[in-house]
Amino acid sequence: MYSVLFVCTANRFRSPIAEIIFRELLIKQKIEKQWEVGSAGTWAQPGFPVIPSIEWMRENLGLDVSGHQSKPISKEMVTNYDLVLVMEANQKEALSVEFPEENRKVFILTELTDGPVYDIPDPVTQTDEDYLSVAKEIVKLVEINFQEICKRAEKI
């Protein structure tokens, strides 16, 4: 069994989107039973729904996130998942400092592409239009890097 954990700040927008898109791609490949996929936040408070809303996710992205509840990252999560993909360099740094024995498996999502490495911004600090552009960027990155994510998780 392989596993990947997507991490953002509050676990209420970026990492849940990545988690669900990755899970959908596993289902399309008919390999979902071989994988565990999760998400968490570096500063998450437990038990909160996605933002801006469950309806927004359904209407704009076609995603059912009704079962999602935010959860904070833990040592157990970082230890048990094969690959940990964060949205920002500061999240990678924080996890590497807090869990140095696991830093070989922590990457920024954009590190898996051939292009430049960059942070995926948190739209909570942006305008409403930015929610959709950030969401589309995450979907694109997970889809483009699907095979690479699988390979890296299988190697670690």
Image (cartoon, grey):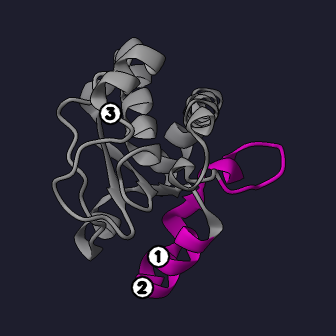
Please tell me whether the stretch drawn in magenta is mainly helix, strand or loop: helix
* Marks 1 & 2, CB-CB < 8 Å contact: yes
SS class of the residue under badge 1?
helix
Query: Residue 148, position in %: x, y?
Result: 61, 39
Q: Residue at x 77, y 55 (%)?
A: 117
Q: Amino acid at mark 1?
A: Leu
Looking at marks 1 and 3 on the same chain, the residue that comes earlier in the sequence is marked by: 3
Compared with residue 9, is residue 123 higher up or lower down, i.e. above or below? above
Query: In the picture, which quadrant includes the N terminus?
Result: top left
SS class of the residue under badge 2?
helix
Q: Picture quarter containing residue 84?
A: bottom left
Q: Residues within 10 Å of mark 3 (few under 14, many from 20)?
A: some
- Residue wearing tag 3: 53
- Residue wearing tag 1: 95
- Residue wearing tag 2: 98
| 104 is within the stretch colored magenta | yes
Compared with residue 57, is residue 41 higher up or lower down, i.e. above or below? below
SS class of the residue under badge 3?
loop
Q: Residue at x 29, y 32 (%)?
A: 34
Separation of disc 1 and disc 2 at Cα? Answer: 5 Å
Query: Residue 104, position in %: x, y?
Result: 54, 70
**Which one is in front, 126 or 87?**
126
